[in-house]
Amino acid sequence: MQEHNVKQMIIKPRMTISELVSQYGQAGVLGAGRLARAVSIVRNMFHSDEYLVFLSMAGPMIAGGLRNIITDLIRNNRIQIIVTNGANVVHDIIEAIGGRHVRGAMNVDDCELAENKIGRAGDIFVETSSFEKLEDFLMKFLNDIPEEQRVSGLSPSELIGELGKRLEDSQSFIRQAYLHEVPVFCPGILDSMLGLHLALFGQLQKLRLDGLKDMKILHDKIFEVRQVGALILGGGLPKHFTLGANILRGGIDSAIQITTARDEDGSLSGAKLQEGISWGKVKSSASFETVIGDATLLFPLIIGATLDMKL
């Protein structure tokens, strides 16, 4: 094994993000070195025309401030497929229709928040009035879809595409995904406020979702390309759906994952990407890196450094 001495990091005034990450890369293979390697992997994905790039999102990434970054990645054709939990779809719609996310605190009285009709995700507060706006919007949205289309069996990604067609906020990632023909897959759509309102609407009028249809839409895309990459924020169902979808093509070719989960309990969220090799979800020849930490902190740094390198 070739040895390289660790170089001590040097911080200078007015450093660019890429210069900072370059210092990380010389420092070693601990957290700083892993982040630098993740930047290199992402840069290679973005630089190659052969890659189809997934963005997988679990956790409150939109409420946590990543909305504009994701929207810009879509606009600039950096990502071609999105897999997300229902929460990120919901919070994107809330922003698009005039709702808001408020900076709060972790050390609060949750009973008092409930009395004041405020829900929280960590230190992010969302007023109940925003969810009331969401309900009104979704009921009108679903009523506006012709009944013939509603009963024909829309897939979840097609339903989200219909949302993108109707949203007017240019910063909505759902809107930009629709405009740039980036499918948004949401395999756990029922496990969200969106799913609740779909279920309530379905009690009153005809509505049918066809989840199997999304598998064909997804597989048609991944078998058209030579290489597949993935940017995985958090774990859970979006991560599993992203990796599992690529089993039939022998696994993904490149990936980074940012997670705070641990791997000792065998959970998928905490599993290092190399574990996916054993399942055929990740190619043995793949380039990959797992970075431990908060995605709302690390993902902007990785993307900022990647784009700072003038692809």
Image (cartoon, rainbow, N blue to C red):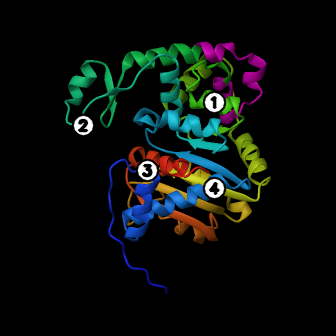
Vertical comparison of 264 with 71: above or below: below
Nearest-to-viewer mark from 2 and 3: 3
Residue at the image position 58 percent from the left and 71 percent from the top = 278
Nearest-to-viewer mark from 4 and 1: 4
Sequence order check, earlier mark of 3 and 1: 3
At label 1, which amino acid type do we have?
Answer: Gln
Q: Measure the C-alpha gap from mark 4 to mark 1.
A: 21 Å
Secondary structure beneath dot 2 equals loop
Q: Any mark on residue 127, and which?
A: none
Residue placed under numbered mark 4 in the picture: 45
Nearest-to-viewer mark from 3 and 1: 3
Please state the extent of the stretch shown in magenta in the rendering: 140-164
As rendered, which of 48 and 132 lies closer to the eye?
48
Q: Measure the C-alpha gap from mark 2 to mark 4.
A: 37 Å
Secondary structure beneath dot 4 equals helix
Is 163 part of what is drawn in magenta?
Answer: yes
